[in-house]
């Protein structure tokens, strides 16, 4: 491909038609781009209906994405990132931009980069530093890798909010993963601590002490948000924390804490879903804690 072809993006392929993939498809479509998507769950009637209503061609494998895509975005779960990079190779033409927004360790990003670069693509790592739904394409992203500076104005022109941080693959990922050790760990701590406080009837006293120790932090509001994120996305967040554990291990550090956080995220989400719920109930955090206590059969 010529520089003009690869540096002007009119056609985009999305790997992963989950929450983030659907948002990106809709927003890019609104900007007049042709967007196609793929997902291993493409046979699911609800997913197919959603894609059809949105006017998005949906394929069941990344290799079937149109080879004419000038930009391919990988937005899958952390555990599927390497597989997605390998699967999409047949759809990568020489010079295709490949934006990997998955929450994985630096080593995993480097492995994905090697796969895409060997196929002639231009790999750009991206670390999404906030939840996507409130912002859409404008969710802040850190870019990394040899192509980051070249990709930044192209992505900005599409509506993305990007900041190149390094020409080395893994720096952006390390930033995201180290932050996630704290954020996702805090989610798990709050869910466990507040649920236990609810079980013992001491939540008011616990919150009062927390507010004294951390003035200005709205613990009830944050607790409500944390419960909902774990209930809705615990599996995805658990996979991210497995990658965070790998990040610490790659740095020669003990990965025990993020590994435990991963297990807690997995367990809470699985137990809640077994009860037929996919989100925290409406109301304050106490309603979510009560649901969890009921699910675990430990309510007084």
Image: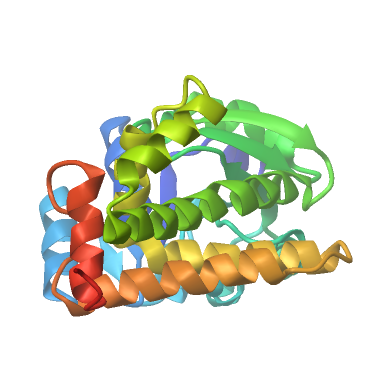
Query: Which residue is found at the position 14% from the left and 42% from the top?
Result: 283
Q: Is residue 208 left or right of residue 276?
A: right
Name the residue nearer the viewer: 13 or 126: 126
The answer to whether 212 is drawn above or below residue 80 in the figure is above
Query: What colour scheme governs how the chains and residues are painted in the rendered image of this protein?
Result: rainbow
Q: Nearer the viewer, residue 185 or 79?
A: 185
110 up-or-down from 140: above or below: below
Q: Nearer the viewer, residue 196 or 271?
A: 196
**Relative image position of residue 265 (x, y in whole percent):** 44, 66
Residue at (47% x, 61% y) in the render = 237
Where residue 45 sits: x, y (%)?
A: 12, 74
- Position of the C terminus by quadrant: bottom left
- For residue 18, which quarter of the picture? bottom left
Q: Is 21 on the left or on the right of 152, as rendered?
A: left
Total marks in image:
0
| Residue lying farthest to the top in this orientation | 216
Q: Is residue 169 above or below residue 272?
A: above
Task: Where is residue 292? Give x, y as percent.
Answer: 25, 66
- Residue drawn at x 22%, y 54% as measured from the top left: 288
Q: Tell me if residue 184 can be seen.
A: yes
Q: Is residue 97 visible?
A: no
Compared across the picture, whether 287 is left or right of 125 comes to: left
Residue ID at (31%, 39%): 204
Question: Which quarter of the picture shows residue 137?
Answer: top left
Residue 5 in picture, x, y percent from top left: 58, 41
């Amino acid at each position: 491909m010529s520089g003009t072809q690869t540096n002007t993006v009119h056609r985009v392929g999305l790997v992963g038609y989950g929450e983030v993939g659907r948002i990106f498809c809709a927003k890019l479509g609104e900007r007049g781009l042709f967007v196609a998507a793929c997902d291993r769950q493409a046979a699911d009637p609800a997913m197919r209906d959603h894609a059809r209503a949105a006017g998005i061609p949906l394929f069941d494998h990344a290799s079937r994405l149109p080879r004419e895509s000038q930009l391919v975005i990988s937005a899958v779960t952390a555990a599927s990132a390497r597989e997605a990079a390998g699967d999409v190779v047949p759809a990568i033409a020489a010079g295709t931009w490949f934006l990997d927004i998955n929450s994985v360790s630096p080593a995993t990003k480097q492995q994905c980069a090697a796969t895409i670069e060997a196929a002639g693509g231009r790999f750009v790592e991206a670390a999404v530093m906030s939840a996507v739904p409130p912002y859409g394409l404008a969710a802040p992203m850190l870019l990394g890798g040899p192509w980051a500076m070249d990709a930044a104005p192209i992505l900005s022109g599409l509506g993305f909010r990007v900041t190149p941080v390094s020409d080395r693959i893994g720096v952006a990922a390390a930033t995201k993963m180290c932050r996630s050790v704290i954020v996702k760990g805090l989610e798990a701590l709050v869910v466990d601590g507040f649920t236990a406080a609810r079980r013992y009837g001491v939540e008011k006293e616990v919150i009062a002490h927390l507010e004294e120790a951390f003035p200005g932090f709205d613990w009830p509001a944050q607790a409500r948000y944390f419960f909902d994120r774990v209930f809705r996305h615990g599996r995805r967040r658990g996979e991210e924390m497995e990658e965070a554990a790998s990040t610490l291990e790659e740095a020669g550090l003990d990965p025990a804490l993020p590994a435990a956080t991963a297990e807690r995220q997995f367990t809470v989400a699985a137990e809640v879903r077994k009860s037929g719920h996919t989100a925290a109930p409406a109301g304050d955090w106490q309603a979510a804690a009560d649901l969890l206590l009921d699910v675990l059969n430990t309510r007084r």
